[in-house]
Image: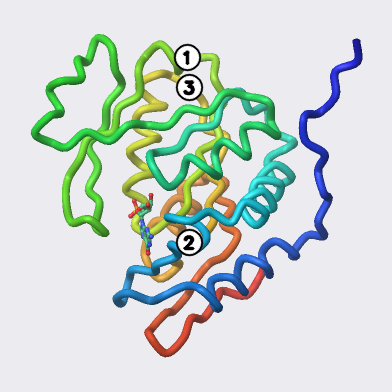
Amino acid sequence: MAITKPVALNQTKKGDTMEALRRKILSEGRVASDDVLKVDSFLNHQLDTVLLNQIAEEFYQRFASEQVTKIVTVEASGIALAVLTGRLFEVPVIFAKKQPQQKASDCQSETFYTADVYSYTKACQYQMVIAKDYLQATDCVLLIDDFLANGEAATGLMTILEQAGAKLVGLGIAIEKGFQKGGDQLRRSGIKVESLAIIDRMTKEGIVFREND
Ligand code: 5GP
């Protein structure tokens, strides 16, 4: 029996998805403070399945030449994008679980890879954990997340990949806040970071995107 791709790619023109995401951010995003953008209507609470699927297709096209064996993200907001992307690559998706720091000792190091991460949006330290059963040294991992800001979540996930001996293929990010340091630092260290909308400046009066390369 012939095996076919489970989902037909729509083959959107390069740039269409970035444009659609920017338009959505401008029409529905809300600048909550100098450095926090709320996008609850399509990405962080209600999910716009058509737009999210387009974003996943764009990630697929940008990383299709790489040998991806697993998608890794962090709960909760990265999961939807990670699942849609994993379906296209036909690979498993793992989401790192977040443990409050006071419960961190519940996750034994014999069973879990762990990393300590600071969330500046929630102003708290937490531990992210992935069970050792699901990540192997043979894995080539694409990291997916909704936002990239200071790079704390990405660095935590990379620490876990290092513990497993897995290879990092790159990062697929929906919205990067380019005025925070994470994206530029990761790119300077040679990591392939593909962000579909990069915000260079934002205030309650408006949002300025970085020009496309
Ligand atoms: P970082 O770890 O790069 O500093 O921040 C990225 C993580 O924090 C993402 O997983 C995302 O959930 C959250 N985050 C960072 N900035 C924002 C933001 O402006 N809005 C929302 N909704 N989440 C953010």
Q: Quadrant of ligand 1?
A: bottom left
Going by the numbered disc 2, the residue's amino acid type is Glu
Q: Position of residue 59 (x, y in %)?
A: 65, 46
Q: Secondary structure at mark 3?
A: loop
Name the quadrant of the C terminus.
Answer: bottom right
Q: Which mark is residue 166?
A: 3
Q: Quick check: can you spot residue 114? A: yes
Q: Return the residue at label 2.
A: 176
Contact, mark 1 vs mark 2 (Cβ under 8 Å): no
Q: Secondary structure at mark 2?
A: strand
Residue 22 as seen in the image, left or right of residue 40: right
Going by the numbered disc 3, the residue's amino acid type is Ala
The local crowd at label 2, few if under 14, some if 14 to 19, many if 20 or more residues have their Cα within 10 Å, is many
**Between residues 140 and 85, which one lies in front from this camera angle?**
85
Outermost residue to the front: 46
Q: Return the residue at label 1.
A: 136
* Nearest to N terminus: mark 2 or mark 3: 3
* Nearest to N terminus: mark 1 or mark 2: 1
Residue at disc 1, CB closer than 8 Å to ligand 1: no
* Nearest to N terminus: mark 1 or mark 3: 1
